Amino acid sequence: MSVARSSMLMASGTILSRAMGFLRAVILAAAIGVTTDAADAFGVANQLPNSVYAIIAGGVLNAVLVPQIVKARSSTDGGKSYVDRLLTFIIVIFFVTTVLATVAAPFLVSIYTSGWSPEQLALATAFAYWCLPQLFFYGLYSLLGEVLNARSAFGPFMWAPVLNNIVALIGLVAFVMVFGADPTGSRAVESWGADKIAVLAGTATAGVAAQALILFASWKRIGMSLTLNFKWRGFGLRPALKAASWSLGMVIVTQIGGLVQTIVASGAVAARDSNPAVASIAAAAIAWLIFMVPHSVASVSIATAYFTKMSTHVQADNIEAMKADLAAGLRSISLISVFSSVALSVLAYPIARVFVGEFAAAVALGNVVIALMVGLVPFSFVFMMQRAFFALEDTKTPFKFTVIQISLHIIGAITISQTLPAEWLVVGLSGLTSVTVTIQAVIAYSMLRNRVGSLAKHKIGSVSLSFIAAGLLSGAAGIAVISLLGGVAEGSFVVNTILSSLLTMLITGFAMMGVYAIALRLLRVSEIDTVISGLRGILRR
């Protein structure tokens, strides 16, 4: 299967999953609100397993598994013995860490919050006891999925989250039907009993478990099986751990930056006495969900497909082929990310209105989205360039440029906490993320060029400028359409109801997409033909 078709197959699963994730977020907002104390308590608790997972294994799995498994396939048994031992080793680490993290739930909640009342801390801790077991299943999902990716079976890894969303949606609908909706936070945190907590957080964890366990069926379909093997001595674990060490350090540094940002964002809760529509942790999480839609659909799908190819080229000592794949991946990512950044910025307020009812809260969330979207393209470029370094089995260099970005981010976050009013804290943090990740992208590109040589002949810069020009034209068209629909003033059609906001997004989005495609055709950008070809291949399948 071509890279374009592989990427589109993964993207199709991601699109469906993200669409369901949006629906899930909308129902969650109806159930517990966005700018409410309960929403922030659940937001912190549901974020904890992701944070702990990233610290103990996120970098290890991304940096190590695919290159090591590709290398192990040359052995007489096709790498099965190595894979069994490596996965057994990591599964044990996940299990032990999950138990320890769950026991430490009160401590973890306390370090991720600032200025919260004892009642809100207690609610967040209760949620955390239910959510932290997700850690084990996130790890299992990543392990099983990365092995499938190394075997070029890309689809299951991207389609499994659909099952996660189905299970979680069932739980949310049941919660609303049994306990009622509370989008404005009228339900006091003290009134949350064990039944409400179990339904909301328990079904979220059940979804993650289903997402992981379904991948065993995909393993079986391609003739693979996992045999737990605890004979770890002498099977070549040391090179994998050495490669992982720098990547693990990179993730730890990233999580320190995330911790500082969460603490600063949680401090905005105190301002709700004077302004109930202050964006805090829950709003930041929804903005990040919106931000991650194009990144997951485009960047992750494309980078995952190219990662295996780049690793194979490196093992064959064909650096020029690796560079060609890297450049093709960056151009394809730029094609989608530039348009997504412009479109989601133009549509930020109607998108926010889908999640929250009050106009002031929609504006607060929309501002966070706009500030974050500025950094979408460089964020996606960094993701792809990291995979290039991982294919080269170089995890030290990504650690270096990540330390620079996080250091700048921590300094900026502390400065923002001391200078901006509470209602602008999360907007400022999102803007800071965009600025620092842009700096990171420039540094990463320079380091990669020093490592593999010039990429000038692959025309990444000139093609990206064409995308930007087309994106600006589509943005102007989008602003014109929204103006014709009444603008974004309170009570206007654009933000009046959820239905009118959805219609605005549909009308404006199609207009912008049409302008973007026509502009790229006029500029004779070949990447648009690659995307269309990939879509046709998926439809034929």
Image (cartoon, helix red, strand yellow):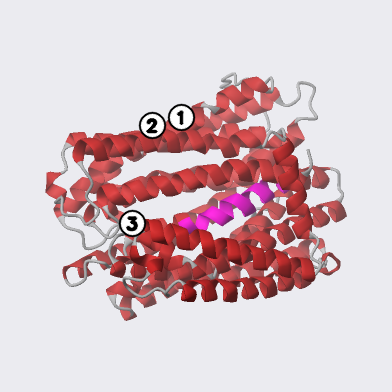
Image coordinates for residue 430, horizontal then vertical, percent? 44, 68
Question: Vertically, is 269 above or below 22?
Answer: below
The residue labelled by disc 2 is: 206
Q: What is the CA distance from the residue labelled 3 to the residue labelled 2? A: 21 Å
Asked whether 534 falls inside the magenta stretch, the response is no
Which residue is identified by label 1?
A: 210
Label 1 CA crowd tier, 10 Å (few <14, some 14–19, many 20+): many
Q: Are marks 1 and 2 in contact (CB under 8 Å)?
A: yes
Q: Quadrant of the N terminus?
A: top right
What separation in Å lies between label 1 and label 3 (alpha carbons)? 24 Å
Q: Front-most of 528 and 288?
A: 528
Alpha carbons under labels 1 and 2: distance apart: 6 Å
* Mark 3 or mark 2: whose residue is earlier in sequence: 2
| Residue at image coords 32%, 73% | 490
Mark 3 residue crowding within 10 angstroms, few (<14) / some (14–19) / many (20+) = many
As drawn, 407 above or below 500: below
> Magenta residues, as a range?
290-307
In-front residue for pair 353/464:
353
Q: Look at the image and tell me whether residue 185 can be seen.
A: yes
Determine the residue positioned at 30% across, 42% down.
128
